[in-house]
Image: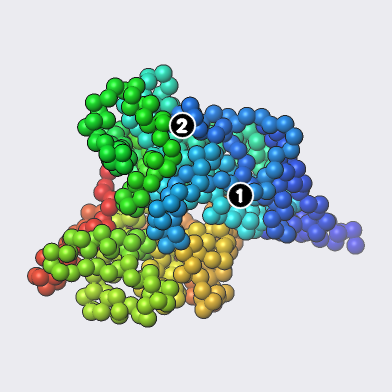
Amino acid sequence: MKRLLKPILLAALAASLAIGTAWACDPPFPTLVKTKFGPLRGFYNTEQTVAWTGVPFAKPPVGDLRWKAPQPPEKWTGVRDATQPCVPCAQIATTPDWLKTGTMAGSEDCLYLSIYRPNTMRMGLPVYVYFHGGANHFGSANDYDGSQIAAKGNMVVVIVQQRMGPLGWFTHPSLRHGESALDDSGNFGTLDNIRALKWIRHNIEDFGGDPERVTITGESAGAHNVMNMVISPLAAGLFHGAMSQSGGMNPKTVAQGEAMANQILSLVLAQEGLTLAEFNAWTPEEQEAYLRSLDASDLWLPLNSAIGTMTFDAFQDGTVVPASVTATIRSGNYNKVPIILGANKSETKAFMPLYGPALSAQLAPYGLELPWIKLIYVLKGVIPSIDYVLPTAFDKKLYQVSGYYGSRNWRAKFVDERARALKEQQGNVWAYQLNWGEPGTGPVPFDFIYGALHTLDIPFFFGQESDIWGYAFRPENDTAGRKALADTMMKYMANFARTGNPNKGPAEGLPQWKKWSNETGAEKAILFDANAEQALLSMSTEEVSIAAEQAKLYYEISTWDPMQQKIYGWVPFAFQWQTAE
């Protein structure tokens, strides 16, 4: 009997350490935690997890701290309540369909984060840090629930906010005094991310996290912010792994940043009947005084109609961000950590209905329009079918061609090009493409209108039971296959956070996710898909290049009727936003 007992106990121990499994006799983790700045009282937000929300990681960036590098938070006395949602950063309120409402939301006092961890007493857990998306002009930590990935991945999950829009990334000569390279950088949102990582470094042990196993992740603008951490010398040593989900932005030059500041200023000044030329005639002191006198809404609301086409990228200031992402990687002077890069098969379809009205202005001289915005109302059931919006075979073809090549261009730029550069410098590089949601897996008509669109990988990695738009996850595809795919993707992520390798960790036994290879014909990226019954995973040897996709697109258009080429030939190129570095 004694000889049998040891194997049984070892098996029980192994089971307790598996993803999402806890000792039945484990006491709950306390909601009261003492940080370096004071005690916090959280709450049991689910049966399996504990949460602390609205946790300050920096002083409020208001008053004299507007457009300044963030400072450590003040210590507090007594127990601070950490049960309320984070106050979102100032922004123009946005509908679930990404349409601007023209009203303000949030506050300048917004440097807060949320923490989720398993409701067990285990310590030394890997830390999964998430930077939210939204083109760096909308979104908040409250849009994401870290409970599922915390419980199933047995990790501490931290979701971070940073200043956004013209409060987060704004560079203008009148704000640069030569006294602080950080204050002069214009990269205030980027510095907020670094300040959050420093807070995590010094406080996460109090929540049971391991400060030596921090993985940073993010989607869209959040992925842009992840890559800025990868290339910023100021973030060295603050994280140990990184994942870029559908990254789609690149740091601007300071000159480009100043041009964007002037664009913003022109809109702001016009509200008061002033011109940029008049503003430029003022002294630098008068310009700064004017900028600092503005309310957050004075800066934001004039951008309501223009901001849909703006992204607030970091600036290549030489201190916080040295250069473009790929150029910095190729120099070898970056933070070398295990890294995952990924994209979704139909990334740009997320934007096509929204940009249809803008493109229609170009077609107006022909008496034509692109009524793509109406496709949203097909999904809402207001319009009965796609045929009411895209009545001809060519209408449908134009939509599909635009979405296909725009998405291929996206992957080429932000996954394949960067993966190749990274592989020249380090070994631990992985890539993925999410294919679920395309015809055959996504619900009709979602599969045609959007497919595996931008943002769709978020619920799979987070284990959420709804997509952020509310179109993809419907009762008819609440299948075993979709759930198995989410479970598999979370397990890969948990392994990666724990060991720096998606194949190694408590969830071993998954299909092998092979590293990216720069060799021709070698395996590059894992393809994530599912049918109704099971997850479908395979490795692809394809490497996508911008030049090759552009050549294919030119050929595609050359087969069209000459009048279609004349009128519509430029439309697919409107979604070719990225160029090779």
- Helix, strand, or loop for circle 2? loop
Q: Residue at x 46, y 70 (%)?
A: 471
Q: Amino acid at mark 1?
A: Pro
- Dot label at residue 85: 1
The residue that mark 2 highlights is: 66
In front of the other: 230 or 268: 268
Give the farthest residue toward the front. 273
The residue closer to the viewer here, 362 or 405, is: 362
Name the amino acid type tagged 2: Arg
Q: Is residue 82 visible?
A: yes
- Which x, y percent locates residue 440? 42, 77
| Left or right of 94 in this view: 404 | left
Question: Residue drawn at (51%, 79%), measured in percent from left and top?
Answer: 476
Q: In the rendered view, does 403 fall on the left or right side of 298?
A: left
Q: Position of residue 348 (x, y in %)?
A: 34, 60
Q: Quadrant of the C terminus?
A: top left
Quarter in which the N terminus is drawn: bottom right
Give the image quarter of residue 255. top left
Question: Badge 2: few (under 14), some or many (20 or more) residues near its Cα, within 10 Å?
Answer: some
Relative to 163, is 480 above or below? below
Q: CA distance from mark 1 to mark 2?
A: 23 Å
Residue 308 horizontal side relative to residue 140, left or right: left
Disc 1 crowd, CA 10 A, few/some/many (<14, 14-19, 20+)? some
Task: Mark yes or no: residue 545 visible.
Answer: no
- The foreground one among 571 and 437 is 571
Q: Which mark is residue 355?
A: none
Is 115 positioned to the left or the right of 27 in the image? left
Q: Position of residue 503 (x, y in %)?
A: 55, 55
Residue at image point 35% right, 56% down: 411
Residue 526: percent from the left, percent from the top? 44, 60
Is tag 1's residue or tag 2's residue first in the polypeptide sequence?
2
